Amino acid sequence: MPVKNRFAELLPEITAWRRDFHEHPEILFDTHRTAGVVAEKLRVFGCDEVVEGIGRTGVVGVIKGKSDSSGKVIGLRADMDALPIHEQTGLDYASKTDGAMHACGHDGHTAMLLGAAQYLTETRNFDGTVVVIFQPAEEGGGGGREMCADGMMDRWGIQEVYGMHNWPGRPTGSFAIRPGPFFVATDLFDITIEGRGGHAAKPQETVDSTVVAAHIVTALQTIASRNADPVSQIVVSVTSFETSSKAFNVIPQRVHMKGTVRTLSNDNRDLAEERITAICTGVAEAFGAKATVDYLRNYPVMANHDEQTEFAAEVARSVSGACDEAPLVMGGEDFAFMLEERPGAYILVGNGDTASVHHPEYNFSDEAIPAGCSWWAEIVERRLPAA
């Protein structure tokens, strides 16, 4: 079964939805306009139930098949939020909000799932129930965690859950997936170094917090190179470094640093947290300074379930003719929280030769819409064959 003809017919309409979302990006949980548009469309389509405010600003739509002898319930999830990036695409439908843009393609994910929802409400050619999930705050806010904490899985009896993300560099509309760990755990750290500020001409009277912090940045790299097993995946990155002074002739009193840790195992998460704290406090003490470390366990490892992964790949092959093995991704993905609660799978759909995600010149490829919509629809019709 190739791309469904209905989605070729709907492509101009779905593209218009996508570009509207692109023009009006919303960050984290502030997805009020997007959620409102989604909820209204689901009601117009004829969903049997539409509920807003799940996980703060998430939306859930329920679509019942022609029959329900199976008693099965499948969840399909798309993320809605944008990123705090100033768009530089020059598109006619570029972001109208300074400092915010859909730089990861969540506008496309939302539009594709809406397209699938419209088709499924029109046809209802399945035996069971579909729950379409539109999630806020994937980009660091943990919206998936919030929706699960609101009892979404139990409230609608979801038994399996499937997600999708576009992937620049892959041929448009092609698919790739892998079983087991797919996206890594992402943790955050916040470090403050307190020294003794003073005049740059009299360093002997100071405890130079900048020098201390610079030594810490270098020392943190030994966690991956000298503490972790060389065959394991771990990345420690300092991504922000700010001093308390902006003057040329002042040694600052303090330095504030932020960063991220990416791992594939709880053992390495424990190791990173312990070593970051030990290195920061030890190096600071050696220089006569003081370090304060806050470590936040953020997204867990996103691991696909074997049976659902093979099924998702089979569906992808039916849509596009092939499904490649995806690489391990060192990025985080809060669909992990849903996969911890229910079996399921997450797949990549090609976005073509475009700028990478999280880039100010990125744009979702509308040509991928028919393949993405067809995959979601086929997940339902194959998993819940009509009685």
Image (spheres, helix red, strand yellow):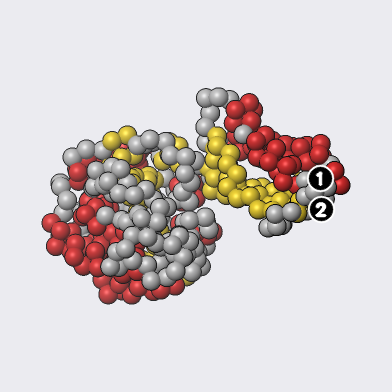
Look at the picture and state if 164 lies above or below 229: below
What is the residue that sits farthest to the front in this orientation?
201
Q: Amino acid at mark 2?
A: Gly
Q: Is residue 312 left or right of residue 290?
A: left
> Whole-percent x and y of residue 139?
48, 56
Q: Give the residue pinned by disc 1.
A: 203
> Whole-percent x and y of residue 359?
40, 52
Q: Secondary structure at mark 2?
A: strand
Residue neighbourhood size for the residue with mark 1, other residues' Cα within 10 Å, grouped as few (<14), some (14–19), many (≥20): some
> Whole-percent x and y of residue 271?
65, 34
Q: Secondary structure at mark 1?
A: helix
> Which tag, 1 or 2, sits closer to the chain's start?
2
Identity of the residue drawn at 33% across and 75% down: 40
Q: Amino acid at mark 1?
A: Pro
Q: How far is the residue under mark 1 from the one under mark 2? A: 7 Å
In the foreground, 364 or 344: 364
In the foreground, 302 or 356: 356
Q: Give the residue pinned by disc 2.
A: 198
Look at the picture and state if 10 lies above or below 178: below
